[in-house]
Image (cartoon, rainbow, N blue to C red):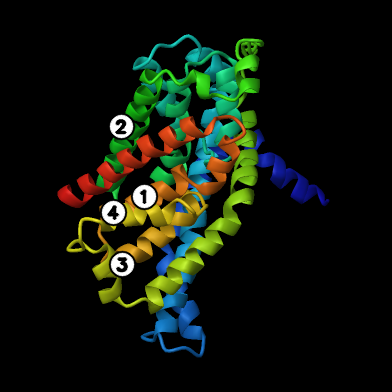
């Protein structure tokens, strides 16, 4: 490695107050070039821009860097935020909390944890082991994949702050009240025996409080980007490719008849049923949501589909089966699905 490259790598941590504003300026400059860049790429190809293929390619060339820029920016920021909040402190904070306050706190913590539904399960088990009430742990499990910072950032970037804010409020409501309902049902006996035997056998140690420099926090932000974006980029490409196909080739009349504002009442439950067997995360599903919206689909119906994909995925349910007995899994799916249906109908009614 040349001395110049080595110095360049050390620069963000060595001079954080110079690096951060420059990085923000470069990020915004790149974001402004996305539309002309995508149009120029399509124009350079032997493809008619007005054709189905031209529209699909323009969507792909525009959305791929847009989603990656949004994701990289928000994950970097949250990587810095996470240096102030450790998993050990999170577990200690939730232990002993009662229903209601604990559910609200757990759901709120889910917003700043960039987990997909499957990767949230190990922390879910850790909460149970630490003695966190069952209903409170479910509020976290529902909120973490469904309303994390990635989902909110992408919704804000694509649909504006009103949609993102309404999604946040309704998503938190689903997570909080679903956890309260499950807690009130007193279903601890439907945890697998090994989980119940494990509960309260260990007390997670309070994280040692250390003061980090801003250089170290920036390093953690870069590490966070490498870890999260490095894992989800295949889902992003797959989701955008599917969204591009929908955008370019699926007839508008067909989508409007299935998921449009004038579609029958059963379109929202149908969207949830279609979403459950699928598996992706917010970064992968939101480009599909954008393409469906562009074809005339109703926002509430499409967001119900999105919530089902990222909060009730089939792989998550398979993993949970190692922790929960079938009756508790069925209760979890039923309660969350009911909340998602309500969100879909509310979005369709008010927007």
Which is closer to the viewer, label 1 or label 4?
4
- Going from N to C along the chain, the mark reached first, 3 or 4, is 4
Residue 292 visible in the snapshot: yes
- Whether residue 36 appears in this view of the structure is no
Callout 2 touching callout 1 (CB < 8 Å): no
Judged from the image, the secondary structure of the residue bearing numbered disc 1 is: helix
Comes first in the chain, label 1 or label 4: 1
Separation of disc 2 and disc 4 at Cα?
18 Å
Q: CA distance from mark 2 to mark 3?
A: 28 Å
Q: Secondary structure at mark 3?
A: helix
Q: What label sits on residue 268 in the rendered view?
A: 4
Mark 2 and 4 residues: CB-CB less than 8 Å, in contact?
no
Q: Indicate the position of residue 267 as horizontal and vertical percent values.
A: 27, 58
Alpha carbon of mark 2 to alpha carbon of mark 1: how far? 18 Å
Which residue was labeled with disc 2? 173
Proximity of marks 3 and 1: CB atoms separated by less than 8 Å: no
Q: Nearer the viewer, mark 2 or mark 4?
A: 4
Within the image, what quadrant is residue 292 found in?
A: bottom left
User: Between residues 136 and 1, which one lies in front from this camera angle?
Assistant: 136
Is 6 placed above or below 35 here? above
Q: Residues within 10 Å of mark 3 (few under 14, many from 20)?
A: some
Q: Residue 135: x and y, percent?
A: 43, 22
| Lower sequence index among marks 2 and 4 | 2
Name the residue tied to disc 3. Answer: 294
| Crowd rating for badge 4 (residues with CA inside 10 Å; few <14, some 14–19, many 20+) | many
Helix, strand or loop for disc 4: helix
Residue 186: % across, % down: 42, 18
The residue drawn where x is 44% and y is 65% is 33
Towards the viewer: 196 or 280: 196
Mark pair 3, 4: CA separation: 18 Å
User: Which dot marks residue 155?
Assistant: 1
């Amino acid at each position: 490695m040349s001395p110049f490259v080595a110095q360049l790598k050390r620069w963000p941590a060595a001079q954080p107050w110079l690096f951060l504003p420059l990085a923000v300026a470069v990020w915004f400059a790149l974001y402004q070039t996305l539309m002309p860049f995508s149009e120029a790429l399509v124009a350079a190809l032997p493809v008619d821009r007005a054709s189905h293929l031209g529209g699909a390619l323009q969507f792909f060339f525009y959305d791929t860097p847009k989603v990656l820029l949004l994701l990289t920016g928000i994950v970097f920021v949250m990587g810095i935020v996470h240096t102030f909040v450790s998993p050990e402190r999170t577990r200690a904070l939730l232990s002993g909390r009662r229903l209601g306050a604990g559910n609200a706190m757990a759901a709120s913590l889910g917003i700043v944890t960039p987990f997909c539904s499957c990767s949230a399960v190990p922390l879910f088990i850790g909460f149970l082991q630490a003695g966190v009430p069952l209903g409170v742990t479910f509020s976290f499990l529902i909120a973490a994949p469904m309303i994390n910072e990635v989902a909110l950032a992408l919704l804000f970037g694509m649909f504006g702050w009103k949609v993102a804010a309404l999604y946040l409020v309704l998503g938190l409501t689903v997570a909080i009240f679903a956890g309260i309902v499950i807690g009130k049902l007193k279903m601890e006996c439907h945890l697998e025996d090994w989980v119940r035997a494990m509960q309260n056998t260990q007390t997670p140690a309070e994280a040692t409080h250390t003061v980090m420099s801003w250089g170290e926090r920036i390093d953690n932000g870069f590490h966070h980007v490498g870890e999260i974006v490095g894992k989800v980029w295949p889902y992003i490409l797959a989701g955008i490719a599917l969204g591009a196909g929908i955008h370019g080739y699926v007839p508008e009349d067909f989508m409007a008849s299935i998921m449009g504002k004038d579609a029958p009442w059963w379109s929202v439950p149908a969207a949830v049923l279609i979403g459950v067997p699928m598996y992706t995360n917010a970064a992968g599903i939101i480009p599909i949501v954008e393409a469906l919206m562009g074809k005339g689909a109703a926002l509430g119906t499409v967001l119900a589909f999105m919530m089902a994909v990222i909060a009730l995925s089939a792989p998550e349910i398979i993993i949970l089966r190692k922790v929960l007995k079938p009756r508790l899994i069925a209760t979890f799916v039923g309660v969350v699905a009911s909340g998602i249906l309500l969100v879909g109908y509310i979005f369709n009614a008010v927007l």
